[in-house]
Image (cartoon, rainbow, N blue to C red):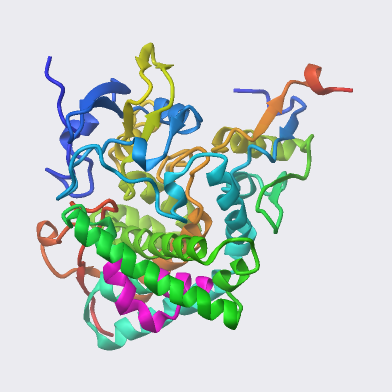
Amino acid sequence: MSDPREPLRLSADRDLCAGAGMCALTAPEVFDQDDEEGLVVLLHPAPAPEHRAAARMAVGLCPAEAIALNSRDATDS
Amino acid sequence: MSRPPCPRRRTGCPLDPPAGLTALSDKPLRRMRYADGHMGWLVTGHATARAILADPRFSSRYELLHLPVPMEGMVSGELPPAPVGDIIGLDAPEHTRYRRLLTGKFTVRRMRQLTERVEQLTAECLDAMEQAGPTADLVEAFAQPVPALMICELLGVPYADRERFQGQVATIFDQTADAEAKGEAYTALLQYLGELVLAKRAEPTDDLLSDLTTSDLTDEELAGIGGLLLAAGLDTTANMLGLGTFALLSNPEQLDALRADPALAEQTVEELLRYLSVADPLPRSALEDVEVEGQVIRAGETVTISVQATNRDPHKFPDPDRLDIHRKATGHLAFGHGAHQCLGQQLARVEMTVAFPALFARFPTLRLAVPPQEVPLRDRSNIYGVINLPVTWDKE
């Protein structure tokens, strides 16, 4: 298991999104759906420590591989 | 080595998959002979199923699929393409275009806003059931009307017309109905939706079908999509409520745990979805040669994903044949996976999360009115469930 204290960077791809809502269901503090198309809206690309476990779970549950975990090295700028 | 056909539903416990399917879980992907003689594949492993369902090299187009179980009166290999609006049988980009018009209507937020309304409809059904009691067919009194009332209201389909379309929907999912009867039922359903679409165009009301008339969808597309949403809304959650009640009554220690802590309702619903897997199986066909689990699935070969088996894969769910509402059942494939994952799943979750606890709170002494082995099963339907569930309770 990943260390929950480790910073987390997330990305979301609305072109891939199937609008199933698994992310908004699983990690509502981190992901939402827009009202028009129901596609993923990333609320917090770097979620607070208490929301990281749920965010990781949401990434694993996404049916369309539309949200991803990025390593800190790859995304820090 | 012989290539066995797809194991069929329920030879033992009505809540378990056929014996042949559970035994396959150590071999996630294997050859299977189809009804028309096609040599395709059967998937029983959870990880393999997920990978295939998320892979665009596997198609959902009906005309490319071979059926794992025969349909009466159908000659092999002649599945027609998806009728207009039946987006289950389409691939991207056509599927994506239609789906995007719908996903905004079924978001987590919008479905949760229906909670109070589902509570009201559920209470009304329970009132009627209680007054007519102390016996009932739970399917007729509760499992069918709760989701039917909600989907009708959401779509803008008059509930009073339910007698007209409920039978048509049942025929469409019935594996014993011949191809001609299915065709007639589908035509009749589309005819009904087509009339409704014209009425909504002329006089829009506050509902999903009226909303969609402002999109660029044609009348024919709208009727097809309306038919799909209606059928899916009527016959899926209803079977989960009926079979789920049967499952909980058959596992009294689980039911007691739910009664003791209604906060377990959400995870109970997930566990019932996993354990019962009523919408099964999911077929796909390879568009090109794809290597999976060290084997090559050739272009044109059909893969049947057994949702029941994958949801009882011991590598994913320890002690999988045990109904355990304390389990984290998330990650089950009861709603499918990939671009086609159930559009209405958040509605189904809200309906079940409300309905199960309300039922058991209203009738603390609810029990089967017949021996469990006499409960009639929908074992020849694409959506599994109980045909009736005779129940009784003590009147106060």
Whole-percent x and y of residue B386? 22, 60
Query: How many numbered circles does the render carry?
Result: 0
Residue drawn at x 20%, y 61% is B181
Is B193 contained in the magenta span?
A: no
Whole-percent x and y of residue B50? 45, 31
User: Relative to B74, is B52 above or below?
Assistant: above
Is B150 contained in the magenta span?
A: yes
As rendered, which of B45 and B134 lies closer to the eye? B45
Horizontal relation, residue B1 to residue A18: left or right: left
Residue drawn at x 33%, y 72% is B165
Image quadrant of residue B107?
bottom right
As rendered, which of B350 and B130 lies closer to the eye? B350
Image quadrant of residue B205?
bottom right
Q: Which residues are magenta?
A: B146-168
| Residue B274 appears in the picture as rendered | yes
Whole-percent x and y of residue B376? 14, 61
As rendered, which of A35 and B71 lies closer to the eye? B71
Residue drawn at x 32%, y 63% is B186
Horizontal relation, residue B124 to residue B308: left or right: right
For the N terminus of chain B, the quadrant is top left
User: Relative to B11, is B190 above or below?
Assistant: below
Horizontal relation, residue B191 to residue A71: left or right: left
Residue drawn at x 67%, y 39% is A15
Q: Residue furthest bottom?
A: B131
Whole-percent x and y of residue B286? 40, 26
Main secondary structure of the magenta stretch: helix
User: Relative to A5, is B335 above or below?
Assistant: below
| Residue B146 appears in the picture as rendered | no
Horizontal relation, residue B49 to residue B263: left or right: left
Q: Residue furthest top?
A: B294
Q: Residue furthest right?
A: A77
For the C terminus of chain B, the quadrant is bottom left
